[in-house]
């Protein structure tokens, strides 16, 4: 192999290509860092007509791992009935309790009217 065809090791510069910054990372490394540390993307969209605000949309996107989110106190998926069977079970138990209480009220009312 000639000297030109040999590729230098990561982070090592050559006369025609000096080494700047950290070595390049693959997608898995980047994704692991983002999920570990987190990234926030925020933006606002505002629609005005003749200086009258018609609509404002605030967009906030947080990209982190589930563990990191829970560490930050963000755990809405645990209480969302669409995403958690525990939350769905709690919601059904609460609804069942309300229905039993309502049935008890109706039965008590009908027995008082029968007297």
Image (spheres, rainbow, N blue to C red):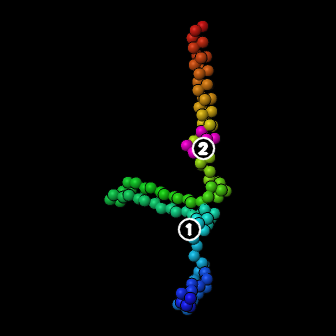
Residue receiving disc 2? 84
Residue at position x 55%, y 62% from top? 40
Q: Which of the 4 image quadrants contains residue 24? A: bottom right
Tag of residue 58? none
Q: Quadrant of the C terminus?
A: top right
Q: Which residues are magenta?
A: 82-88
Up-down relation of residue 61 to residue 24 (above or below): above
**Furthest-left residue in this view:** 50
Residue receiving disc 1? 27
Q: Which of the 4 image quadrants contains residue 66? A: bottom right
Q: Nearer the viewer, mark 1 or mark 2?
A: 1
Q: Nearer the viewer, residue 53 or 87?
A: 87
Residue at position x 60%, y 36% from top? 91
Q: Is residue 52 left or right of residue 114?
A: left
Up-down relation of residue 66 to residue 82 (above or below): below
In the rendered image, residue 85 lying in the magenta stretch gets the answer: yes
Can the viewer see residue 76?
yes
Residue at position x 63%, y 41% from top? 86
Q: Nearer the viewer, residue 98 or 25?
A: 25
Q: Position of residue 41 (x, y in %)?
A: 52, 63
Q: Position of residue 57 (x, y in %)?
A: 44, 55
Q: Quadrant of the N terminus?
A: bottom right
**Furthest-right residue in this view:** 71
The secondary structure type at the circle numbered 2 is loop
Label 1 crowd bin: few (<14), some (14–19), many (20+), radius 10 Å: few
């Amino acid at each position: 192999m000639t000297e030109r065809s040999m590729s230098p090791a990561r982070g090592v510069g050559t006369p025609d290509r000096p080494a700047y910054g950290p070595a390049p990372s693959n997608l898995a490394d980047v994704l692991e860092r983002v999920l570990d540390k987190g990234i926030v993307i925020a933006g606002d969209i505002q629609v005005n007509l003749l200086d009258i605000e018609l609509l404002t949309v605030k967009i906030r996107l947080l990209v982190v791992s589930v563990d990191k989110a829970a560490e930050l106190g963000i755990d809405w998926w645990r209480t969302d009935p669409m995403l958690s069977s525990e939350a769905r079970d709690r919601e059904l138990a609460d609804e069942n309790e309300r229905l039993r209480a309502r049935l008890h009220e109706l039965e008590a009312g009908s027995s008082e009217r029968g007297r």
